[in-house]
Image (cartoon, grey):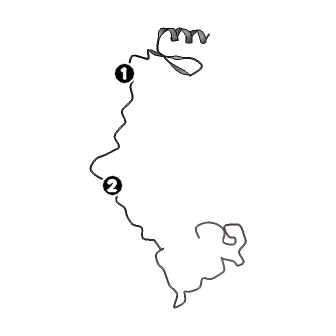
Amino acid sequence: MLHGSMRHYPNGRKKSYNAWTTKTRAPSEGALVVSEPYRRETPVYKSHDNGTCNTKKKEINKYTGTFITGICTMHKSNAVPITNQQQAIEIARMSK
């Protein structure tokens, strides 16, 4: 026993015998004695390897166009893209 009580079961119920004074019985002549724990046979599946690695690092997306001219904060941390000068003026008026 690794840990716990010798007089109670793991669920808390009291044992009907005293484990300290109970002697262990010798196995009978016809009893099966197992020296190692049973381990089931598990098939081994090799992972697929065709010589190419498909875990390349993802390229970072970068905006290369000219449609969006900037980013403005409309309310607290709400980032809004700005496409022209008129939008920038409208958002600046709303923040006041």
Residue at x-position 56% and y-position 22%: 78
Under circle 1, the secondary element is loop
User: Is 78 situated above or below 17?
Assistant: above
Q: Amino acid at mark 1?
A: Thr
Residue 30 appears left or right of 12: left
Residue 75 place in picture, x, y as percent: 59, 19
In the picture of the structure, the residue carrying the numbered disc 2 is 48
Q: Are marks 1 and 2 in contact (CB under 8 Å)?
A: no
First in sequence: mark 1 or mark 2?
Answer: 2
Answer whether residue 71 is magenta in the image: no
Callout 1: 10 Å neighbours few (<14), some, many (20+)? few
What is the magenta range?
Answer: 2-24
Q: Nearer the viewer, residue 50 or 86?
A: 86
Q: Which quadrant, please, contains the N terminus?
A: bottom right
Under circle 2, the secondary element is loop
Q: Main secondary structure of the magenta part?
A: loop
Q: Nearer the viewer, residue 28 or 55?
A: 55
Cα distance, mark 1 to mark 2? 38 Å
User: Is 31 situated above or below 39?
Assistant: below
Q: Amino acid at mark 2?
A: His
In the picture of the structure, the residue carrying the numbered disc 1 is 64
Residue 47 place in picture, x, y as percent: 35, 56
Answer whether residue 23 is magenta in the image: yes
